[in-house]
Image (cartoon, rainbow, N blue to C red):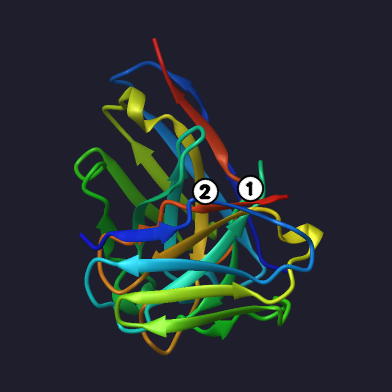
């Protein structure tokens, strides 16, 4: 059974840092791109960033709103995905989901499994 | 960036109704579009990918169509468990983007 379990959320002051983790199980982690998606309170879904799979050398992509402040990484030995968040702003307040990108022949995968989310609140 | 415009943003319907949700892309995305639904307090769930392919385990009352810039999600007979918010997502190019959502509520 595929499982994604996020952790590390909490309250942080503006300008602070936080690292989120996502523990993956039930599938071959290195085969999949992995993504972070967030949802501000009462708002829609916003893609944050991606790390590609081993075959694509774990390269990354980011949304403009977080580029230069957030870093997506992964540890294959721990089957874990991370989101290092620096210089946090109040507008980064959201539930953060990790999501598994499906293996599709198109090379343009959607998200077939999601974690339950972890809440990040940026406030003084 | 590719913008996705969903309509309507809110929909009131009854159990058994046929429901259609539209998603328009600001530029052509071939068939690189997915549909999700999300219930309050829960993670989104994939329904359709490749614009029209039903994800494994998703009931056949859900269907998707379209290509290029115009896409549609149809629920042939709305069930109580289908009351949720529906999102389209384009996976054609970065940044990946989602539509603003369509909330389906009980009439």
Taking the spot 20% from the left edge, 59% from the top edge, the residue there is B1
Marks 2 and 1: CB-CB under 8 Å?
Answer: yes
Question: For mark 2, does the 10 Å Cα neighbourhood hold few (<14), some (14 to 19), or many (20 or more) residues?
Answer: many
Question: For mark 1, does the 10 Å Cα neighbourhood hold few (<14), some (14 to 19), or many (20 or more) residues?
Answer: some
Disc with the residue nearer the chain's start (2 vs 1): 2
Name the subunit of mark 1. Answer: A
Taking the spot 55% from the left edge, 63% from the top edge, the residue there is B36
Q: Is residue A123 left or right of residue B14?
A: left
- Quadrant showing the C terminus of chain A: top left
- Quadrant showing the N terminus of chain A: bottom right
The picture places residue B104, in percent across and down from the top left corner, at 63, 53
- Look at the numbered disc 1 and give the secondary structure of its residue: loop
Q: CA distance from mark 2 to mark 1?
A: 7 Å
| Corner quadrant of residue B66 | bottom left
Question: What count of labels does the image hold?
Answer: 2
Name the subunit of mark 2. Answer: A
Taking the spot 35% from the left edge, 71% from the top edge, the residue there is B91
Q: Is residue A79 above or below residue A104?
A: above
* Residue on which the image places disc 1: A116
Q: Is residue A55 visible?
A: yes
The picture places residue B82, in percent across and down from the top left corner, at 72, 61
Q: Which residue reaches farthest bottom?
A: A105
Q: Which residue reaches farthest top?
A: A124
The circle drawn on residue A97 is 2
The picture places residue A36, in percent across and down from the top left corner, at 43, 52
The circle drawn on residue A3 is none
Q: Is residue A73 left or right of residue A9?
A: left
Taking the spot 30% from the left edge, 74% from the top edge, the residue there is B92
| Corner quadrant of residue A105 | bottom left
Q: Is residue B50 visible?
A: no
- Same subunit: marks 2 and 1: yes
């Amino acid at each position: 059974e595929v499982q994604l379990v996020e952790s590390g959320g909490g309250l942080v002051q503006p300008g602070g840092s936080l690292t989120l983790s996502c523990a993956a199980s039930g599938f071959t982690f290195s085969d999949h791109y992995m993504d972070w998606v967030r949802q501000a309170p009462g708002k829609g879904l916003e893609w944050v960033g991606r790390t590609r799979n081993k075959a694509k050398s774990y390269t990354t992509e980011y949304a403009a709103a977080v580029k230069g402040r957030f870093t997506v990484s992964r540890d294959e030995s721990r089957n874990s995905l991370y989101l290092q968040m620096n210089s946090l702003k109040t507008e980064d307040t959201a539930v953060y989901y990790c999501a598994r990108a499906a293996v599709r022949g198109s090379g343009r995968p959607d998200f077939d499994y999601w974690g339950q989310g972890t809440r990040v609140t940026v406030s003084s | 960036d590719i913008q996705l415009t969903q309509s309507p943003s809110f929909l009131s319907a009854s159990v058994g109704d046929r429901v259609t949700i539209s998603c328009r892309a600001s530029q052509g995305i071939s068939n690189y579009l997915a549909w999700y639904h999300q219930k309050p307090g829960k993670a989104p769930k994939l329904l359709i990918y490749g614009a029209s392919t039903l994800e494994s385990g998703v009931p056949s009352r859900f269907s998707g169509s379209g290509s290029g810039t115009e896409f549609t999600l149809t629920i042939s007979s709305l069930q109580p468990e289908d009351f949720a918010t529906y999102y389209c997502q384009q996976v054609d190019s970065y940044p990946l983007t989602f539509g603003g959502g369509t909330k389906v509520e009980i009439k």
